[in-house]
């Protein structure tokens, strides 16, 4: 594919550019620094690759700083670059890339072919590092002055191994991450294993295992380590069972037995469901309070009923009298036989008898309430009683005090709480016994008006007393748990220091970390697989590098030699190694490091050579090479070698279209002069403004004439300069005419020749006339600087200068040097 | 890069499922134009998943 023209819009230094014609084998573009040469090269680079090397490098430094830098700072979107390209089959297509700025100003791009969204790969434009056709000066030494690994990567990319190298690098970094920061499960497992090692070392059968794990928790062998632990358990227990759960159960039982020999805590241990028991007691307390409330109501009802009641004898008497009276209509009393029982009296007596029946009911209800409360209190009493553990007898108290005698106060603190627990529950039990007795007496006491007040007071204060009893019981139970836990820990430590217990604990510790051993074992396997993958990729990569360097490395050397013909100090070869690639040079046959010993110019040549090797890769879809200031740090000889050896080789041997951007005018001229038969295109970048540079086709004579005319219209100093520039114009006309007629520039002997020196050359050029010879002689004489020192010499006027300009213009037109 | 012949050649001769899985994640990440650090994160994710799967397998046995 060849470039026909390019149009960068709002891209970097360019604003709204027109199509720039590039449809030629050779194009030179000359422009001062900062006039958009690199913008033009990068426009092509971005169009084809979707990014530039400079931007990629910048993003690695700071994405924030480089974000948005594809766009011209003075113009708005859209940012796009288009190129007309000629494909191998001769068809011309228009390819375009447009910048897309997404959320959080993240940049991407979309591509078009002939105005329709499409992938450039559809027309065979594979943007591979191995084909890179854009050679920018600032990137030439990227791979030279860089760490060995990055150099290896850059060269590998140039050899077409970029994906493989990137994959290997990513794999290696992921492996390092996986190794240095393992998954959380693995970290936890390692911690558990290290903790287990503290116990494992107390058993002779597991001691070695402890040392192995302790030296590095990665040293885990699932099968072998697990067998060691099972064997240790079997030997210690003298059993042949191999089921781990059974072994663990046996070991725990054995440990308990051994522990009890030191001090048996089992009787003192609070019930395992103590929390549930406390909860049940609290729940029962609520029921007791409900029952007390019911009792209180029954007492009140009973007392009220009793207050309106007459003696039992009287009630029986009235009941009998009413039954004996003749009829309800008679007012005759059966006792005194007098009319003393009128109807209203009879009603009064009947009410009195009914009131007695209510009292009987109230009494019944009272008895029921008392019975209920007694039952609820009995249940609560049982719940509270269940909180208490066994108590220590005197013998065990002494053993405990003696066992903990080296820790002042430890036994005493526990025993104080232990004793308080005992007395509290005893006190509560006595209270409940008393309450039960009082409740049993309650109905009878209420019959006695003298005891009613006391009875009611008892019922009234009972809730508070129950509440107090429950609170104290629970509070002391909780305090006991705390003290017991401390004691258990201390006693546990004492037990654990027992040699026999330690041996058991060692095996238990090992068996209990089985899951963690599995975790580490699995992790180790994955890590090992990963290491194998990295080694396999590296080995494959090195093989490929070796093969490719055998052929493509030779190409690099050939390009280098073209720019350094016959040099005694030079680059000689690239040598691949693991994660590095050495660049060798030689000085008069002695081998040395190229990056360390070669000059900047030589290293630039080496950089160019690597780029040229990749740009001329046979599979490359790109039929052009763009150079951005390729010879910037080269001396004249290297520069000349580049111009006379490299450029023609690219055009003639590799059939590449060559585009050279340079800030050195004579380089552009020299390339054009040496390739005039190829009819090269030459541009000049000028008048750079916010919209970018003006890209102007460059015709030397026209430019010189324009310059002289401008000066001739100026003041005296400018006109003096115009006269000097006429000499230069004469020189340019003669050189251009020679080039046109002979197809090659003037021989090197004329490189520094003046206009006067060139007069004989002009006369010898075929097609020139004697009149022209005379005219040129006059003009050379007119502009001879020797006149300037003559006493009567005056600076010529515009009218005196113009005829000479006209003369040179006519000669140039006649010989078709300008249009 | 997805169609890179050297990487394809390597994978064709490589039998490791892990390598293929990592390569798949790598190619997907490069297609998305993720940064180098983001690519490593993706591969790390694959490794962590692979580890968990192996661990579960070990425990099931």
Image: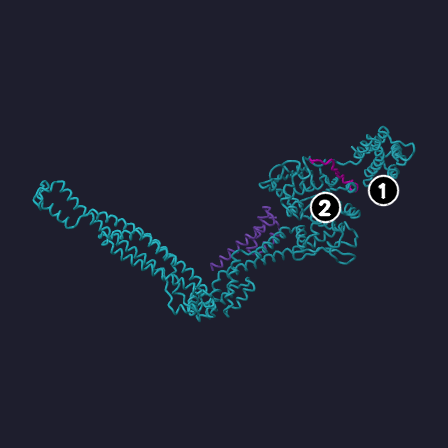
Q: Residue at x 67, y 35 (%)?
A: A16
Judge whether residue B24 can be spotted in this image: no
Residue A484 appears left or right of A176: left
Q: Are marks 2 and 1 on the same chain?
A: yes
Letter of the chain that mark 1 sits on in the rendering:
A
Q: Earlier in the sequence, mark 2 or mark 1?
A: 2
Density class for disc 2 (Cα within 10 Å; few <14, some 14-19, many ≥20) is some
Q: Is residue A676 magenta?
A: yes
Letter of the chain that mark 2 sits on in the rendering:
A
Instruction: Identify the magenta region.
Output: A672-691
SS type, badge 1 = loop
Density class for disc 1 (Cα within 10 Å; few <14, some 14-19, many ≥20) is few
Q: CA distance from mark 2 to mark 1?
A: 29 Å
Judge whether residue A441 can be spotted in this image: yes
Instruction: Name the residue beneath numbered marker 1.
Output: A752
Which chain is cyan in the rendering? A
Residue A267 pos. (x, y %)? 38, 65
Image quadrant in which you'd find residue A277: bottom left
Which of the image's four quarters has the N terminus of chain A? top right
Which of the image's four quarters has the C terminus of chain A? top right
Q: Give the color of chain B as drawn.
A: purple
Residue A123 appears left or right of A746: left
Q: Which mark is residue A137?
A: 2
Q: Is residue A134 magenta?
A: no
């Amino acid at each position: 594919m060849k470039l026909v023209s390019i149009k960068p819009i709002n891209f970097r230094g360019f604003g709204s550019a027109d199509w720039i014609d590039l449809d030629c084998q050779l194009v030179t573009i000359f422009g001062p620094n900062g006039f958009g040469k690199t913008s033009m090269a990068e426009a092509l680079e971005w169009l084809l690759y979707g990014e530039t090397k400079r931007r990629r490098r910048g993003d690695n430094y700071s994405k924030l700083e480089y974000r948005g830098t594809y766009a011209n700072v003075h113009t708005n979107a859209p940012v796009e670059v288009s190129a007309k390209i000629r494909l191998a089959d001769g068809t011309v297509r228009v390819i375009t890339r447009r910048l897309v700025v997404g959320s959080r100003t993240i940049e991407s791009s979309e591509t078009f072919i002939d105005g329709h969204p499409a992938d450039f790969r559809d027309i065979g434009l594979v943007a591979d590092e191995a084909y890179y056709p854009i050679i920018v000066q600032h990137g030439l030494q990227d791979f030279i002055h860089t760490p060995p690994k990055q150099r290896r990567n850059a060269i590998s990319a140039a050899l077409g191994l970029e994906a493989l190298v990137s994959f290997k690098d990513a794999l290696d970094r992921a492996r390092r991450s996986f190794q240095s920061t393992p998954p959380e499960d693995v970290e936890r497992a390692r911690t558990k294993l290290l903790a287990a090692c503290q116990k494992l070392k107390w058993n002779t059968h597991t001691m070695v295992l402890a040392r192995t794990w302790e030296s590095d928790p990665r040293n885990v062998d699932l099968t072998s380590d697990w067998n060691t632990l099972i064997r240790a358990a079997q030997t210690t227990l003298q059993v042949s069972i191999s089921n781990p759960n059974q072994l663990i159960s046996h070991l725990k039982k054995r440990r308990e037995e051994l522990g009890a020999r030191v001090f048996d805590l089992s009787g003192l241990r609070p019930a395992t469901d103590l929390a549930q028991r406390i909860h049940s007691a609290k729940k029962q307390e609520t029921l007791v309070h409900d029952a007390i409330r019911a009792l209180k109501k029954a007492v009140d009802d009973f007392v009220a009923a009793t207050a309106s009641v007459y003696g039992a004898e009287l009630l029986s008497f009235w009941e009998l009298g009413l039954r004996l009276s003749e009829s309800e209509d008679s007012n005759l009393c059966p006792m005194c036989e007098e009319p003393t029982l009128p109807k209203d009296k009879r009603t009064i007596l009947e009410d009195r008898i009914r009131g007695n029946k209510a009292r009987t009911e109230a009494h019944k209800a009272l008895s029921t309430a008392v019975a209920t409360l007694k039952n609820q209190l009995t249940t609560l009493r049982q719940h509270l009683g269940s909180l208490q553990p066994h108590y220590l007898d005197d013998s065990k108290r002494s053993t405990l005090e003696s066992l903990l005698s080296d820790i002042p106060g430890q036994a005493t603190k526990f025993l104080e709480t232990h004793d308080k627990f005992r007395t509290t529950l005893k006190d509560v039990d006595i209270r409940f016994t008393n309450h039960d007795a009082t409740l049993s007496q309650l109905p009878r006491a209420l019959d006695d008006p003298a005891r009613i007040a006391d009875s009611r007071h008892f019922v009234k204060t009972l809730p508070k007393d129950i509440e107090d009893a429950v609170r104290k019981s629970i509070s002391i139970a909780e305090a006991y748990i705390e003290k017991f836990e401390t004691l258990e820990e201390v006693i546990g430590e004492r037990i654990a220091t027992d040699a026999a217990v330690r041996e058991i604990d060692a095996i238990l510790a090992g068996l209990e970390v089985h899951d963690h051993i599995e975790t580490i074992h699995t992790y180790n396997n994955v890590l090992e697989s990963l290491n194998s993958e990295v080694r396999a990729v590296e080995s494959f990569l090195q093989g490929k590098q070796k093969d490719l360097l055998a052929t493509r490395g030779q190409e690099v050397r050939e390009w280098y030699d073209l720019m350094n013909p016959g040099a005694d100090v030079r680059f000689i070869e690239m040598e691949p190694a693991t994660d590095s690639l050495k660049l060798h040079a030689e000085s008069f046959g002695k081998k040395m490091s190229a990056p360390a010993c070669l000059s900047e110019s030589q290293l630039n040549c080496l950089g160019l050579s690597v780029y040229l090797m990749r740009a001329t890769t046979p599979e490359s879809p790109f039929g052009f090479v763009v150079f951005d200031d390729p010879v910037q740090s080269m001396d004249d000889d290297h520069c000349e070698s580049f111009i006379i050896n490299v450029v023609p080789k690219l055009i003639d041997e590799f059939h590449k279209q060559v585009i050279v951007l340079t800030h050195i005018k004579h380089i552009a001229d020299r390339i054009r002069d040496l390739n005039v038969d190829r009819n090269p295109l030459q541009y000049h970048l000028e008048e750079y403004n916010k919209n970018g540079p003006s890209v102007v086709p460059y015709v030397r004579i026209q430019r010189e004439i324009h310059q002289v005319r401008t000066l001739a219209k100026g003041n005296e100093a400018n006109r003096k300069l115009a006269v000097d520039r006429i000499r230069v114009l004469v020189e340019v006309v003669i050189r251009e005419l020679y080039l046109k007629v002979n197809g090659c520039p003037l021989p090197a002997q004329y490189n520094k020749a003046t206009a006067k020196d060139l007069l004989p050359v002009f006369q010898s050029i075929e097609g020139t006339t004697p009149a022209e010879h005379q005219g040129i002689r006059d003009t050379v004489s007119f502009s001879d600087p020797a006149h300037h020192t003559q006493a009567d010499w005056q600076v010529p006027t515009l009218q005196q200068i113009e005829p000479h300009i006209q003369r040179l213009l006519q000669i140039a037109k006649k010989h078709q040097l300008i249009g | 890069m997805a169609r890179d012949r050297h990487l394809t050649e390597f994978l064709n001769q490589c039998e490791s499922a892990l390598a293929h899985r990592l390569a798949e994640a790598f190619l997907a990440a490069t297609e998305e134009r993720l940064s180098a650090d983001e690519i490593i994160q993706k591969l790390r994710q694959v490794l962590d998943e692979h580890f968990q799967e192996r661990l579960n397998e070990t425990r099931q046995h």
